[in-house]
Each structure stands twice: as C-alpha cells, then as structure tokens.
Image: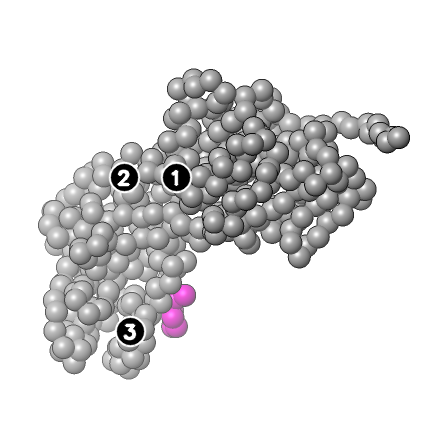
Amino acid sequence: MTTKTKILYTRPWLYKKQEEAIFCDERYSVVEASTKSGKTVGCMVWLAEQAAIHGGLNMNYWWIAPIYGQAEIAYRRLKAGLGEGNYIANGSNLTITLANGSIIWFKGGDKPDSLYGEDVHAVVVDEASRCKEEVWHAVRSTVTATRAPVRIIGNVKGRKNWAYQLARKAESGVVGWRYSKITAADAVEANVLQADEVAEAQRDLPEQVFKELYLAEPSDDQGNPFGVDAIYKCIAPMSNKEPVCWGWDLAKSVDWTWGIGLDEDGAVCRSERWQSPWEETLKRIVNITGDIPALVDSTGVGDAILEFLAKAGSNFEGFKFTSTSKQQLMERLAVAIQQQQITFPEGQLFNELLSFEYVYTRTGAQYSAPSGLHDDGVCSLALAVYHQDNKPGIGVWL
C-alpha cells in the first residue's frame, strides 16, 4: 500500500498581472514582457508547482533557454529558490528531482534536434524571441502525447520571429491560447522595478531598444537601430565650422577609408572618403586631421596603422571593434541621432544610416550594413560621436 505525504505549500508572492499571465487555465500562454518584470520568476514557480503537484515518478518537466549557459543560470536560480528541501539537484545534467520522482530539466535550445523524443508534462520556453524556431517545433512535438501546458515568455525582438507570430495568434483569441503583455510600468506599479531606474534606462538606450525591452513594443523600423524618422530629423547642411574631433574608419578589402569631422555643436563639418594604397592613406589622414583629436579604427591591420599615426601625433587614439564594443558604439550613436545631438547632410552617409541594420542573437545585438552595402560612414560617424563624449587620452579604446 502506497502512503501519500501531504505537503503544506504557500505560493510565493506574485503580483496580479504576473500571476494572471502565467497561472491561467489556457494550455498555451504567451507573455511578452519587460525585462526584469518577474516573468522568469513567475514561470519558475509555475513549473515547480506543475512538477510537485501534478508530477510523479520519472515525469519530465522542461525549462528551455536559448543557449546552455542561460539554462545553467535558470537551474541555479530555481535551486536557490527551493532552498533546503527533499529534492536531488544534479549540476552535471542540470536536473532537479523532486520527492515525488518528477524531474525538472534545464535545456539549451541551441541544438533543437536534442529536444525530440521525450514525453514532457509541462514546458517553459524562456527568452523565446531569442530561441530558434526549431525549438518551438520540438516542444510542440514533445507535448503531443501528454497534452502538456506550455508557457512561452520573453522580451519583444522585432516582428520577424516565431515568438512574435505566436503572440499574435494568442492575442487573436484562439481557443486554448492566452496572450499577456507586462510592461515596465506594470512592474513599477507592483514595486518590482523602480521608476527612476526605468527612466534612466530610457535616457541611456536607443528608442527602439527601450521600447522592446521595457514596453514590449516591437520596432517599426525593420531592424534599423537609429529610427528612420529620427535620421531624417538630423538632416542639415554641412557645417562650415572647424572640427573639434575626428572619427576614422579604415578600409578593409572592398571598403573605403572614411573620416568624419564634428564641430563643437555636433554637426558634421568634414567628410573625407577614398580608396588608396596604405602609404597614401596614412599621409592623407595625418594631413587632414592635423592636431585635432581623432579616434581611429585599430582592428586587425589597424594596429600597425595606429602605431604609425601615433608617431605622427599624440592626438590619435585607437578603437578595437568587437561585437561588444561595436554594440556600445552604435547604441551611443543611436541615442545621439534620436535626441538630435548631431546633424549631417544628405548623401552617402545619410544613405548608409538608412540602410544600417541590427539583429539580436543569443550573444547580443549585431550591427552591420546589409549584404553588398557599406557601413564605413556609419562607423566613422560613431567613432567621432564616441570620441566627442570622452576626453582624449593616450591608449586604445576597447
């Protein structure tokens, strides 16, 4: 005869919108939410309850993150939240086995084919807009036999992804689907976020990024990080003042060497663009820049160029482009454009700004020109803006 143990349980505090979005009767719930609004914590509580209350020996419950490293973070968070208790945590395979024998698995979605095969009794897909669409295909397959409930949560990331499309399906009122939107304002009202911190983030971030991360609103600019309307508002004739700083993007293969000079008001006052052998390029940069502070692309071959320029004058500093540093550079340029801190004339630079795009990946945002186009002008303008923000010194910006 099997003896069942009654466990007294009180659900941790969740605010109303958070609880309604996650602990609903619909089988599928899609939650588009602000960053740090409590969607992840709420779903951890939900999944633990599903396993503890409805689970049994060897019944599987899944938490899926975009990559394995994020799954590890979720595993540690839930383990810490459970505290001391009657469960077995295995950090090697990222599982938590509860007293009733049910198993909570934490999985990365970077290899969707590995998600097929098991029967699963409840699933959370975290940061869904950053997961591959094949993750959803695998999840739908694994819950077919069990008719298990699924929670799909995350920030908004544009309109061109499967999570956005499922959110619209849920929002349309399809039976069995629920849609919820939780904004930063909701989290502030619930005292989960502080209003002054959200306001500071709005000042610090490009408009489109803030809207997606805090307001759960997709960008209307189809991947342009600056905003098409904002770009047009910055159009002005070339300034006739002298530059106070330069940004230099050096030619790579088919690209162009391009220098942008900004005046004291943030207006483009000089624009120099050419293709030539390195020896001629170096001389031209030195002659054009003079003793004005300049930030120079020092990535790759640029290191040797910077060394030569540094000998010509201490006003030259280097900037190494990495995925992280380029993101920081472009986000600062986006703020400058959206707040009309700079102006530039129509022409090649304006066209590059309009065509420039970004996509969010599992490791962050990637900024570049579309295939077959150039972004030398965008990079040189971003370098000039970045340098104007900071006092010149000696060394290399990383």
Magenta-drawn stretch contains 362: no
The residue indicated by pointer 3 is 302
Q: Which residue lies at the image location 17% right of the left edge and 56% below the top edge?
A: 372
Binning the other alpha carbons within 10 Å of mark 3 as few (below 14), some (14 to 19) or many (20 upward) gives some
Closer to the camera: disc 1 or disc 3?
1
Above/below status of 152 relative to 355 = above
How packed mark 1 is, by other alpha carbons closer than 10 Å (few <14, some 14-19, many 20 or more), is: many
Give yes or no for contact between labels 2 and 3 (Cβ–Cβ under 8 Å): no
Report whether 112 appears left or right of 345: right
Q: Which residue is mark 1?
A: 157
In the rendering, at what x and y percent does residue 63 appear? 58, 41
Which residue lies under the disc numbered 2? Answer: 222
- Name the quarter where the C terminus is drawn: bottom left
- Residue 142 position within the rendered picture, expressed as x and y whole percent measured from the top left: 53, 38
Which label sits on residue 78?
Answer: none
Question: What residue span does the magenta drawing correspond to?
Answer: 393-398
**Sequence-wise first label, 2 or 1:** 1
Estimate the x, y position of residue 231 in percent, counting from the top left.
22, 42
Main SS category, magenta section: loop
Disc 2, disc 1: CB below 8 Å? no
